[in-house]
Structures are given as structure tokens and as C-alpha cells.
Amino acid sequence: MKILIVEDEPKTGAYLKQGLTEAGFVTDLANEGWDGLELAKEGHYDLVILDVMLPGLSGWQVLEGLRRAGIEVPVLFLTARDQVEDRVKGLELGADDYLVKPFAFAELLARVRTLVRRGYAGLESAVLKVADLELDLLRRRAIRAGRRIDLTAKEFALLELFLRRQGEVLPRSLIASQVWGMNFDSDTNVIDVAVRRLRAKIDEGFEPKLIHTVRGMGYVLEAGAHGVIP
Ligand code: CA
């Protein structure tokens, strides 16, 4: 699941990004309002965490811009100002929740999970499937042929990416930016090791094999692989 963080304070931004990434979310970070609005409009996020006091556009203006553009992504406001008017204003503009700084990360994570779940409530299901493999995004679990598979947060995010883009060859650079939130220009070994571990968990002892290497290009997940080297 993908979260956009719009926060101008470097320490808070880095803290949020690291914590949410460790919790298994894919995150992008914008440090001012205009960038935040642009990313939010284009990035297909499951949640936006929005600081109120931002350079460029304020958090309120970003939210207004989003709702005007018809984007109904859940929004969690962060503010240092614990004032009733602020809360009322944010909620009137269509914010979904409020958190006052400073906050405990555990509390933020609980709110984030609730909002993301609510965002999925309108959908038929939050389970991604291929062959006999199921990834339940809300319960955070993977099951193959009825057997529960334990995944790390990174492996979960990686499998989610593969499942969302079934049949598409994903270059290592794309995997790096989507799952690790950074570019591995030289060290694609990190990706290879992670894919190998994931493959060992979801493919070893099962048929058909799902994750395939496409030499010179990257990896693809599909149940019936044609023209690729397993
Ligand atoms: Ca701020």
C-alpha cells in the first residue's frame, strides 16, 4: 500500500518515512505543498499524511486542491496546533482524521491502518490473487495452497507490487524505487537477493512457479509463463 507524506520538517519527514517503510508501506515524501499536491494527484496513493504548516501551499490548500480535482484519497492531518478551529476547518475541508504533534509512532500507525482499511471498505475485496496464492492486504498475510506464508514487511511490499502488476516485466530499478523508495544504480544485488528470498517462500514446493527472471530485463510474476526463463 502506498502512502504520501507531505511534511517540510526534515526530521519528522524522515522519521515517518522510515517508520512506515518498516511497517511495510511504500512511501513517497514531499517537503512542500505544491509538490505534495502534484504527487497526490498523480501517484495513486492509499493515504496522504499532510502537515498543516507547509511552504508553498498549506496543508489545507493541498486538501482543497485534491478534493476539487475529485480525488477522494483518505487524508490524515498532522498539526502542531491543538486548536479547535483548526480541527473544524480541516474536517470541513474533508480531512479524515487529525493527529497533533508530537505524537507516538504507534498511535500514528494505528490511525494509518484504520484509514487505509476504511479506504478499502468500498471495494469488494482487498485480496490480491494469482493461481492458488492470495495476499490479504488488510490482514497482512499471504496464503498459498491453503498454507500460511510468513513474509517480512519488505517481502510483503515486493509481493504486493508483483501482484498488482501481474504479467508485466518489472525492471530492478522500478522495484527499487517502488519498494525501497530509492534508486539502486549500481547495487541491484539487493533486489536480486530479496526476490530470491521471496521466491523461496512462495514458489519452493509449489506449482506452478510464479516469479520468473527475464534475463537482462528484470522479473515478472505470472502463473503461465511464456517466453521467459524460469
Ligand atoms: Ca510544517
Image (tube, grey):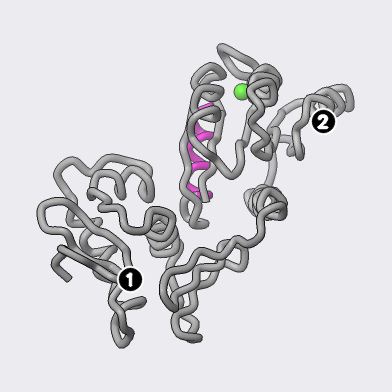
Q: Name which quarter of the figure residue 55 lies in.
A: top right
From the top left corner, tell me how far across and down residue 62 is, in percent.
63, 21
Q: Residues within 10 Å of mark 2 (few under 14, many from 20)?
A: some
- Is residue 33 located in the magenta-colored stretch of the structure? no
Q: Which mark is residue 223?
A: 1
SS for callout 2: helix
Is tag 1's residue or tag 2's residue first in the polypeptide sequence? 2
Of 164 and 91, nearer the camera is: 164
In percent of the image, x 65 and y 17: which residue is there?
A: 58
From the top left corner, tell me how far across and down residue 119 is, in percent.
68, 48
From the top left corner, tell me how far across and down residue 46 is, in percent.
58, 44
Q: Which residues fall within the magenta stretch?
A: 9-20
Specify whether 161 is left or right of 175. right
Q: Main secondary structure of the magenta part?
A: helix
Q: Quadrant of ligand 1?
A: top right
Q: Quadrant of the C terminus?
A: bottom left
**Residue 110 appears anywhere in the view:** no
Q: Looking at the picture, does residue 38 appear above or below residue 117?
A: above
Marks 1 and 2, how far apart at CA: 45 Å
Q: Is mark 2 within 8 Å of ligand 1?
A: no
**Label 2 sits on residue:** 91
Outermost residue, left direction? 216
Q: Looking at the picture, does residue 24 appear above or below residue 89?
A: below
Q: Nearer the viewer, mark 1 or mark 2?
A: 1
- Is residue 15 located in the magenta-colored stretch of the structure? yes
